[in-house]
Amino acid sequence: SAVISQKPSRDICQRGTSLTIQCQVDSQVTMMFWYRQQPGQSLTLIATANQGSEATYESGFVIDKFPISRPNLTFSTLTVSNMSPEDSSIYLCSVPTGKGSYEQYFGPGTRLTVT
Amino acid sequence: DAKTTQPPSMDCAEGRAANLPCNHSTISGNEYVYWYRQIHSQGPQYIIHGLKNNETNEMASLIITEDRKSSTLILPHATLRDTAVYYCIVRANNYGQNFVFGPGTRLSVLP
């Protein structure tokens, strides 16, 4: 299994500001996924981040609001821009295992509260 | 949209088997059944997956019906630490395929 860490683990931010969330994996992976989990809700995919190419965003999510960087095969960042209270969520990154069954492993998440 | 239907909540007595059902009547031939769980404030944890045969690992057993339209996750001896939301997901076994999470089943293991 992959070991995934995220920074920060939680933050409280003021509306209108931006927060960059880091995701670090202990092995090289081609693809990384970013999910959002709003309070009391299930997980929703934000985007898929491939190294060396632009991230692919799901319907309802745009690059200006959630820019993603993928500088190498072990690291990615997600920025939540111009935050509003509606952005208060847990943000999670995940990676596929690449061992044939392709289950995904998830990071511990970043709990964001926007005031 | 998620392709599965699960009961919103279940209770189980500590030490007893927890049987979590999942309906996936529109599952395609190339889609696997995956189970994850999410303990409060943590990232989802992979439990088990299968195609058509029953599967068992150190965490759980997965029973898939012959027509593959439903399955059951079995935690043989539930503990308080198994209290979590359990997600049943059907998905093709592709490296780049993301998981679509439904609302899941909130399992409460009671002392």
Image (cartoon, coloured by chain):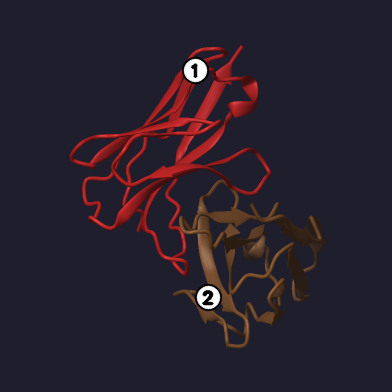
Chain colours: A brown, B red
Report the residue marked by disc 1.
B12
Decide which of A88, B6 is in the foreground and name it. Answer: B6
| Residue drawn at 56 percent across, 46 percent down | A40
Image point (47%, 74%), residue name: A58
Can marks 1 and 2 be said to lie on one chain? Answer: no
Secondary structure at badge 2 equals loop
Disc 2 residue type? Phe
Q: Which mark lies nearer to you, 1 or 2?
A: 1
Residue occupying image coordinates x 49% and y 58%: A102
Q: Compared with residue B54, is residue A53 higher up or lower down, i.e. above or below?
A: below
Distance between mark 1 and mark 2 Cα atoms: 38 Å
Q: Position of residue B74 (x, y in %)?
A: 43, 26
Q: Nearer the viewer, residue A97 or B14?
A: A97
Q: Is residue B37 above or below residue A46?
A: above
Q: Is residue A71 left or right of residue A35?
A: right
Above-or-below relation of A18 to B31: below
At label 1, the amino acid type is Cys
Q: Which residue is mark 2?
A: A61
Q: Chain of mark 2?
A: A
The N terminus of chain B appears in which quarter of the rendering?
bottom left
**Residue B86, position as x, y percentages in the image:** 49, 38
Query: Disc 1 sits on a residue from what chain?
Result: B
- Residue sitting at the far front: A99
Q: Is residue B12 above or below residue A103?
A: above
